[in-house]
Amino acid sequence: MHRRVIVTRFQVLFISLIVTFFLTNCATSEETTRLARNISSTDTELSRLRYENDRRFSELAKEDENIRKQLVNLSSSLDDKNEKIKVIFGKLDELEYQLRTYFNELKNEINSLKKSGTASPGGPTITQRQTPQTPNRDYETAYKDAFEAFQKKSYEEAIKKFTAFIEVHPGTPLAPNALYWIGESYMNIKNYEKAILSFQELVDKYPKSDKVPRALLAQADAFNAVKDKKSSTTVLKKVIELFPKSEEAAIAERRLRN
C-alpha cells in the first residue's frame, strides 16, 4: 500500500513537470510572437519616419533654393535702386549748385546796383560782373559732361573727365562733388582700393564739404567689400562722431547694429 502511494506521487510530480515545461514553452512562444510583432511595428514606424524626414528635407531644400533666388533678385534690385538713388543725388547736387549760383549772382547784382548808384548800364560795374561768368560756364559745362558719362554708366570715361575737371578747376565749388563721383565710379567697376583713396582725398582736401558724410559712408562700403570689417566699422563710427545729427549718421548706426 505504501509503495503504491509512492509511485503515484512520482507520477504526479512527473506530470507537473511536463505541464510546467509545456506552459513555459507556450509563454515563451507568445512572448516571441509579441516581440516579433513589436519589432515589425517599429520597423514600419521607422520607415514612415524616414520617408517623412526625406520628404521634409526635400521641401526644405526647395524652400532654401527659392529663398536664395529671392535674395539674389532682391540684391540685384537693391543695386539698381542704389544706382538710381546715386544718380538722383547727383542731379540734386547739380540743381543745388545752380540755385546757389543763381542766388549769389542775384545778390551780387543787387549789391552792384546799390554801389553803382546812377551809373549807366554800360559802366564798369556791369563789366566787373561779366568777367567771371565765362570761366563759371566753362567749369559747369565740364562738370556736366563728366556727370553725363557717369549717368550713362561709362565709368572709366567719367573717371577721366572728373579727374581732368579737378586738375583744371580745383578751387571751384564742384571740385568735392567731382571727387565723390570718381569714388562712386570706382565702386561701380569694383576697384574698391581706388574708391577708398578717392573718398579719402575728398575728406582730406575738402573737410567742410557737405559731401564728406556721404563719402565716408561709401568708403565704409568699400572697406566692407574688401573684407576689412575693422576699418569699415571705424569709418562708420567716425560718421556718427563727426556728423551726429545727419542722415548719414543714422544710416551708420543702423549698419553697426546689423
Image: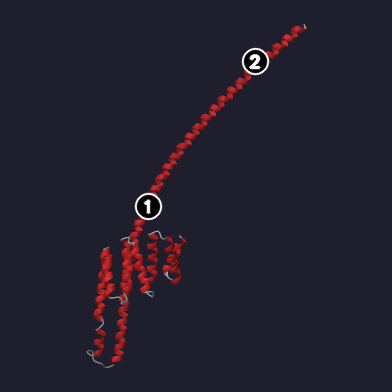
Establish if 2 lies above or below 251: above
**Element type where label 1 sits in the image:** helix
First in sequence: mark 2 vs mark 1: 2
Amino acid, disc 1: Gln
User: Residue 70, labelled with which disc?
Assistant: 1
Determine the residue located farthest toward the right in the rendered image: 2
Position of residue 211 measured from the top left corner of the image (x, y, whole percent)? 36, 71
User: Residue 162, labelled with which disc?
Assistant: none
Position of residue 8 measured from the top left corner of the image (x, y, whole percent)? 72, 10
Q: Give the quadrant of residue 7.
A: top right
Disc 2, disc 1: CB below 8 Å? no
Determine the residue located farthest toward the left in the rendered image: 122
Establish if 80 lies above or below 207: above
Q: Quadrant of the C terminus?
A: bottom left
Amino acid, disc 2: Ile
Residue at 54% from the left image edge and 30% from the top image edge: 38
- Discs 2/1, front: 2
Q: Is residue 24 left or right of residue 48?
A: right
Q: Which residue is mark 2?
A: 18
Residue 161 visible to the viewer: yes
Q: Give the quadrant of residue 189.
A: bottom left
Q: Residues within 10 Å of mark 2 (few under 14, many from 20)?
A: few
Q: Quadrant of the N terminus?
A: top right
Separation (CA) of disc 2 from disc 1: 77 Å
Color scheme of the displayed model: secondary structure
**Element type where label 2 sits in the image:** helix
